[in-house]
Amino acid sequence: MGSAYLLRRLGGAALTIFAIAVLNFFLFRLLPGDPVNTLLPRNVSQAQKDALRHRLGLDQPVLPGIIRTNQGAFKVDFSTLPDSVVGNQFVTYLQNLASLDLGLSFAERRPVIDVIGEHFWPTILLVGVSEAVSIVVGVLIGIRAAWKRGGPFDVTSVNSSLVLYAVPLFWLGMLLLFFFATPNGIPLFPSQQMSTPGAIFNSPVDQAIDIGRHLFLPALTLALGGIGGEVLIMRSSMLEALREDYVLTARAKGLKEADVVRRHAVPNAMLPTVTVVALTLGYVLGGAIGVEEVFAWPGMGRLTVDAIHNQDFPVLQGLFLIIALCVVVANLIADFVYSQLDPRVRT
Amino acid sequence: MTVGRIPQPLSRFHRGYASLRLLVSNRQALVGIVILAAFVLIAVVGPFVVGPIEKPGTPGTTPLLNPSATHLFGTDQAGRDLVKLNVVGAQVSLIVGVVASVLTMLIGTAVGIVAGFLGGRWDNWLMRITDFFYVLPTLVLAVVLAAILGPNLLNVIVVIGMTSWPATARIIRSQTLSIRERMFVDRARAYGASNRRIMTRQILPNVFGLVMANTTLTIATSIFYETTLSFLGVGPHETYSWGRILEESFNAGALTLGKWAWFVPPGLSVVLVVLAFTLIGAGFDEILDPRLRLRGGPHGVTELAMAELEATLEPRA
């Protein structure tokens, strides 16, 4: 049964990941300046610079027959050929990627993969919790809004969704922070970081509660941002399903209205939502950058902002790769879930 | 039995006027138009009313003033009047929104029409590229690109245009697919019109309404992106925008200082303008697709969301 479908999807995802790697390589070759000057202090000798350049592979041609001067200009140089067919920066880059070597951070002077690794799970926790909340709440509201179409609940939820859709998430975070984490409002929650600095916890439960308190506001911000889209999509999808013949049949059989909705309309209306969730993940990950910055949440979003301020391009390059990878994997999972729910696509 | 007057086809002008009247008669769109008109007025007339932004360190300026009669929103960390900054912010946000959106439309419409009309290998490759960019997290790509290219107005516009065209391309492509099958396209071909001529003279005018409806939505997205890019420190550095005011207020600790007049007005402006464009876009869609008027009632927007969703999900073969 669906193994050919899955294989095709896997192949597609692999191709996308390769394309992302290629795009990533060329994007960061557009940068002006010499990374060696950024990494080393000013007063080092040319020999030391050359040694580092060699270690980073920057003395190689960029592509077969194309070199980059130390001033950053691209030049065609056929004298490097036959060697540069294999010995070029692009091949080295792909080899390094295969061994998870993403280069050295300019700011921290250690491997990029280690720096990103420390910031990976906080983002997954934040985005995971808020996506889960927004999906559950959004789908439930969407179902009810479609069911009670035109009523006050429907009108209210559609209008609030539209407004939520228009709010920049980082600004929503600033408002929540202002009202619930500073003395200007009611300071119910901590405003910074992922846990209380210097705190010693008696049990893992205490620690979890502390993290939960820190997680609450940023997760609420991102969840609110996601709910708008979920409600609108689930509602439309439900309205579509409620018009179908099988719903009429179910009603004609004399089923209770609640059963008609729950057992006949909802399962079918859920299908498009699965795909949309994966697509909105990119939106939420993007929104998480600003929200993490506002709440000083130690995730990949905050790292992105730090990397921008420090001009730490290797970290930025690594972050783009990892975040794009997360989105591709999420889409793959969504495709898989979809194929399990809807046998028609398994062809 | 009386025979009614035979309806004459409307002239282009009258068609435009008729759709404008429809747009205004749509309550949602009317709200959007009113909000937008207010902000356009602020952006155009505002600078003459409030005067230029003070240079930092000008004698007589005091930093971090609270709202008062002379400084309605107070002053920022360099003593600049926040009303003036917000007025300039309105200009920049609207300019970035419109210009970036035009760029998005140019790329998206060209890709969509060529892929949809020529089909075959063109369609295959163009849609592969489109799908690739569609899957990439747009905002993250925009942030990275803006950081690489450098933070100025032109680059921010280019970055937004280059990252947000895929959704447009998919919508225009699916519309082109249906127009391609119409009789007048066959007729043009029978006359010996070239592909290029059919695409520019037959297809383009027929997808143009959809392009306009989509433009209002992409303007909203573009303003949204500009604000976020500015907040993250990769927005235009040579001028003030709502996002940059928010960035500076956040970095100066406006939240703990309780200076709500510093960060509430620019954020609220973004919400209102984005909402206005969304509502106008929904109104446009109802005019173009009368089925939405029947189905949608007061909720045309959700039907619009679904229609766009269908268009964007469709080419997944």
Image (spheres, rainbow, N blue to C red):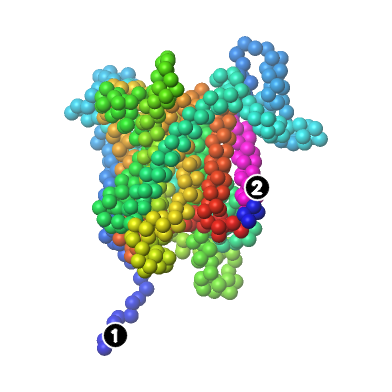
- Residue that badge 1 annotates: B3
Which of B62/B281 is in front? Answer: B281
The x and y percentages for residue B118 are: 60, 61
For disc 2, the neighbor class at 10 Å (few under 14, some 14 to 19, many from 20) is few
Instruction: Determine the chain carrying the residue at label 1.
Output: B
- Residue that badge 2 annotates: A11
Q: Residue at x 49, y 41 (%)?
A: A282
Q: Quadrant of the C terminus of chain B?
A: bottom right
Q: Quadrant of the N terminus of chain B?
A: bottom left
Q: Residue at x 37, y 60 (%)?
A: A260
Q: Residue at x 68, y 30 (%)?
A: A99
Left or right side of A291 for B124: right
Location of residue A222 (image quadrant) = top left
Residue A16's disc number: none
The x and y percentages for residue B54 are: 31, 26
| In the image, residue B101 above or below residue B51 | below
Q: Residue at x 43, y 40 (%)?
A: A132
